[in-house]
Amino acid sequence: TRVRSSAASDVYKRQLYLYGVFVVSWEIRMKIARRLSRQKIVYKAVSEIKPAVKAEHAKAVVAVFVVSALFMSASQGMVAPVFAHLFKETSSGVRTLGFMTMVPQIALLVLSPFIGGLEDRYGRYPFLLLGFAGLVVTNISYLFAHGVAAYTGIRLAQTMVCVGIIPATMSMLADVVPEQQRTRRISLILAGHAGGMTLGPVIGGFLLQRWGATAPFGVSALFNLAALCFVGTMLPRIS
């Protein structure tokens, strides 16, 4: 009888132990299931928020770049009539204008790959600010320049400091704009450049005729300052 009672007690203890193990494992499984369910809900919410945030960033980035392209191109086109006016009385006026047009393109050809590598290493945002700040300074420098050499040197310096603007613009645009919309967004920025180059010579010619050669340089500097402030304050920081 004692042997049977002891055996029954051992069986009861084993069943009780197995039941405890089952209850504990069930609780662990339920906790894991609840945690995974919460993670799925959070992931779903984040996945729904991210495209909306990215779309808002894309719109802001495109708007900033279109406006800055308009101001920058208008400022560049604004000074073109001034150079034609200043060099019209020299015997090598046409040659000088051709040389001033060639020098920046050579600088772009040489410096663009180098500046693009620096932007990949240190970021695009500082080069954008540096480029527009350089445009402001060089346009102000035109006010104190006298002679072909001074104008050509300032033109070269202007190209060197702003060579990183276009690569930074295109790469930042590619970061936030979906691939299906990039062509359209780039076209808007190019339209901003075209609009600036259309309005710039008209404004520059009017200022030159009304107030002399210094007015287009000063207004051009103000246009670039506006673009610098717009980029510095309105452009979203993209990681």
Image: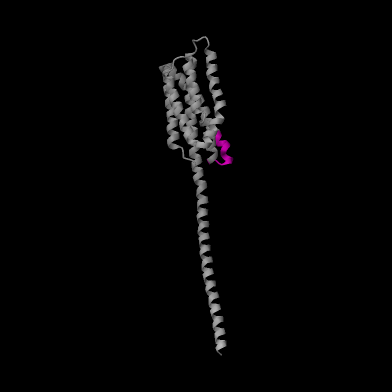
- Name the spot of residue 61 as percent of width and height, x first: 49, 38
Residues 103 and 170: in front is 103
Residue in the image at 44% along x and 37% along y: 234
Q: Nearer the viewer, residue 75 or 12?
A: 12
Secondary structure mainly formed by the magenta segment: helix
* Vertical side of 229 occupied by 210: above or below: above
Q: Is residue 81 visible?
A: no
Q: Locate residue 98, reporting x and y percent.
A: 55, 17
Q: Is residue 215 left or right of residue 198?
A: left
Q: Which residues are magenta?
A: 176-186
Quadrant of the image containing the N terminus: bottom right
Residue at point 42%, 32% (across, down): 229
Q: Is residue 182 magenta?
A: yes
Q: Quadrant of residue 15?
A: bottom right
Image location (x, y in percent) of residue 233: 42, 36
57 or 172, nearer to the observer: 172
Q: Residue furthest bottom?
A: 1
